[in-house]
């Protein structure tokens, strides 16, 4: 038999009360949010610098954006971008700064204005007209096969049948 408990036993480890647990959880959550906010702000600035650097071409490197280039000028340009973003300038203002300094050739993709609109329109038109040309070619090649001899002129059909008769006569002569 189990002995009856007459008095309440004290726990060996003093467990914190529910109130203390809530306070500790709130403090940890607050610390996490403050720490996380600082990291995400730094990451977002790096992301914005990288995004703008990808939109600008390096003036001394051929075919590389400012983000991809390791030249001293590209590194300086990335620092200028970072400084201007820290000052609170927008993406457009930073890009305008570099366009005013280096001209529109600094842009990785030319704006669709003036003659540059052809660079934006011509690839689409080439795909459309190329697809139409292939479609017309395939349609005409299929319509010629399906109709048999109907596409040939009558004199060609007569010449073909005369030719086939001569071949048959030659074959019979060689078989006998």
Image: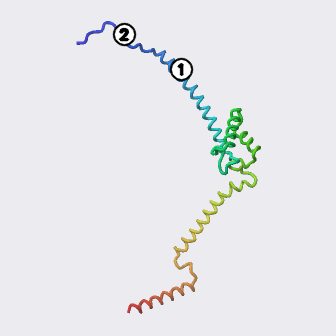
Q: Which one is nearer the viewer's eye here, 24 or 101?
A: 101
Q: Indicate left or right for 23 with 57 as reference.
A: left
Disc 2 secondary structure class: loop
Closest to the observer: 6 or 35? 35
Asked whether, in this view, residue 175 is left or right of residue 128, the answer is left
Badge 1: residue crowd in 10 Å (few <14, some 14–19, many ≥20): few
Q: Which residue is drawn at 42% across and 89% down?
A: 171
Vertical order, 45 against 154 (above or below): above
Judging depth in this view, the residue of 63 and 96 nearest the camera is 63
Instruction: Indicate the quadrant containing the C terminus: top left, top right, bottom left or bottom right.
Output: bottom left
Q: Where is residue 27 in the image (x, y as percent from the top left)?
A: 53, 20
Identify the residue at horizontal 68%, vertical 37% (top origin): 79
Q: In which quarter of the image is residue 45?
A: top right
Label 1: element kind: helix
Quadrant of the image occupied by residue 13: top left
Q: Where is residue 66 in the image (x, y as percent from the top left)?
A: 66, 44
Q: Which residue in the protein does label 2 denote?
A: 10
Cα gap from disc 1 to disc 2, whole angstroms: 29 Å
Q: Which mark is residue 27?
A: 1
Residue furthest top in the image:
6
Identify the residue at horizontal 31%, vertical 6% (top origin): 6
**Closest to the observer, 36 or 159:** 36
């Amino acid at each position: 038999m189990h002995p009856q408990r007459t008095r309440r036993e004290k726990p060996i480890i003093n467990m914190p009360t529910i109130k203390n647990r809530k306070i500790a959880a709130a403090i940890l959550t607050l610390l996490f949010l403050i720490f996380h906010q600082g990291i995400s702000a730094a990451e977002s600035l790096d992301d914005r610098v990288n995004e703008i650097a990808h939109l600008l071409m390096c003036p001394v490197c051929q075919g590389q954006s400012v983000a991809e280039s390791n030249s001293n000028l590209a590194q300086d340009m990335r620092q200028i971008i970072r400084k201007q973003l820290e000052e609170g300038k927008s993406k457009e203002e930073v890009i305008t700064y570099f366009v005013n300094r280096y001209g529109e050739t600094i842009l990785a993709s030319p704006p669709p204005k003036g003659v540059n609109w052809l660079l934006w329109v011509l690839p689409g038109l080439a795909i459309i007209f190329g697809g139409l040309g292939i479609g017309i070619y395939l349609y005409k090649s299929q319509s010629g096969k399906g109709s048999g001899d109907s596409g040939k002129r009558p004199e060609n059909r007569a010449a073909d049948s005369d030719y086939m008769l001569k071949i048959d006569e030659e074959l019979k002569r060689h078989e006998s």
